Image: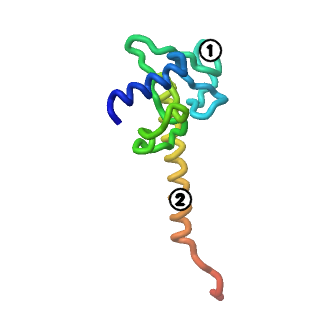
Amino acid sequence: MSPLAGAALYAAVTGRANGGCECAHDRPGGCGRLDHPVTGRWCHQSAGPGVPLHVTPVDPATPDHTAVTLGPDELLALCRACYVRRRNTHRKTREQQLAAELAERQGALFALDTEGITP
C-alpha cells in the first residue's frame, strides 16, 4: 500500500471518529476499561499536536499482514492509552490460553492408560 493510500485510510477512520478515540466498553475492540478518566465508560481522548490516534483492527487478534488489507469499517481509531491497554490485555489473554493448552497437552502426554492392567 502506498503512503498516500495509507494516509487516505487513516483520514477516513479518524474522520469517522471525529478525531477522537473510539474506545467504548460496549463496542467490539474496546480496551476493556470501564472507568476512563473524566468520561466514565467511554474514552473521548481527542487527537492533537503530538497526540496522534492509532488506527487498529477491531479484532485485536488480526495479524499485521491481514490488518493492512482491511477497510475503514474494520478499523478503529484509538488513543495511545487505549491502544496499549487493549494490546497488553489481548497479549496476556493469549498467553494464558497457550499456557492452559500446553498444560493440557503435557498432562495427556504423561497420563497412564490403566485400562486392561490388572494388579
- SS at circle 2: helix
- Residue 104 visible, this angle: yes
Q: Which amino acid does label 2 sit on?
A: Ala
In-image side of 115 versus 7 (left or right): right
Mark 2 or 1, closer to the camera: 1
Q: Residue at x 54, y 16 (%)?
A: 18
Circle 2 Cα neighbour tier, 10 Å, few/some/many (<14 / 14–19 / ≥20): few
Mark 2–mark 1 distance (CA, rounded to whole Å): 41 Å
Q: Callout 1: helix, strand or loop?
A: loop
Please determine whether, in this image, residue 43 is positioned above or below residue 56: above
- The image quarter containing residue 118 is bottom right
Residue 66 point in image, percent of width and height:
44, 44
Question: Which residue sits at x=51%, y=52%?
Answer: 98
Task: Say which residue label 2 marks.
Answer: 103
Q: In which quarter of the image is the C terminus?
A: bottom right
Res 39 label: 1
Task: Choose between 97 and 48: the one closer to the eye.
Answer: 48
Residue at image location 54% in from the left, 57% down from the top: 101
Residue positioned most to the left: 2
Residues packed near mark 1 inside 10 Å, few (<14), some (14 to 19) or many (20 plus): few
Q: Tell me: residue 15, above or below residue 76.
A: above
The disc label shown at residue 50, or none: none
Residue 26, position as x, y percentages in the image: 66, 29
